[in-house]
Image (cartoon, helix red, strand yellow):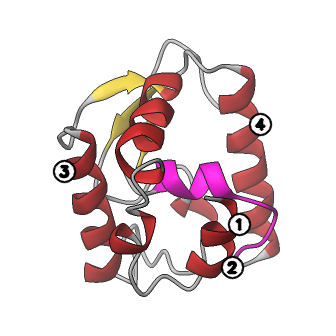
Amino acid sequence: MIQDLKHPIILRPHHGLCLQHFEGSGYSKEFVENMTLVLKHLSEHPSQTVQLQCTTDILCSRCPHNLHSRCKSGQKVASYDAACLALCGLREGDILSWKQFRQLIQLHILQKQKLSGVCINCEWLAICGKKT
């Protein structure tokens, strides 16, 4: 189990998109293994709460771009987070279930075909774009 289900998992807003498109590729073996475990946990426990934070999160914990709890991609990922929050009508610090967050992303970003606008310049966009 990732965490006690009673406690929210800290999640970057744009990672709600990444988790919905994940297919086993990633920055490193450790990153892929962690992403797989987090996705499995959330899929098995859709009522798991997540707290949206625009800082390093549970997925960043195994990312080689995480330098002392700061993403070396900096402003690029911050813009992904801001766009995701704005389009979904959410704010940093909001707590909701994974199911609710996933549905908001589906409704406000994926179904409205706004993924490429949110994830502009993301190296993984070609993979995600095929699944949308």
Q: Amino acid at mark 2?
A: Tyr
Specify start and end residues of the magenta stretch as a single range: 15-26
Q: Could you say which quadrant of the image residue 3 lies in?
A: top right
Marked residue nearer the N-terminal end (1 or 3): 1
Find numbered disc 1 in the image and state the secondary structure of the residue it sits on.
Answer: helix
Q: Reply yes or no: does residue 16 show up in magenta.
A: yes
Q: Nearer the viewer, mark 1 or mark 3?
A: 3
Q: What residue sits right under mark 4 in the picture?
A: 40
Q: Quadrant of residue 26?
A: bottom right
- Which quarter shows the N terminus? top right
The amino acid type, in three-letter code, at marker 3 is Ala
Assess whether residue 125 is covered by the magenta stretch. Answer: no
Q: Using the numbered discs, state the Cα–Cα distance from disc 1 to disc 2 in whole angstroms.
A: 6 Å
Query: Which residue is under mark 3?
Result: 86
Vertical relation: 57 (above or below) 47: below
The quadrant holding residue 118 is: bottom left
Indicate which label's residue lies in the foreground, 3 or 2: 3
> In this figure, which residue is indicated by the disc labeled 1?
31
Q: Which one is nearer the viewer's eye here, 89 or 5?
A: 89
Tags 1 and 4 in contact by the CB under 8 Å rule? no
Label 3's element? helix
Q: Residue at x 24, y 31 (%)?
A: 94
One can see residue 1 in this view: no
Q: Calculate the distance from the C-alpha at mark 3 to the C-alpha at mark 4.
A: 27 Å
Q: Which residue is denoted by mark 2 in the rendering?
A: 27
Tag 3 near tag 2, CB within 8 Å:
no
Mark nearer the N terminus (1 vs 4) = 1
Disc 1 and disc 2 in contact, CB within 8 angstroms: yes
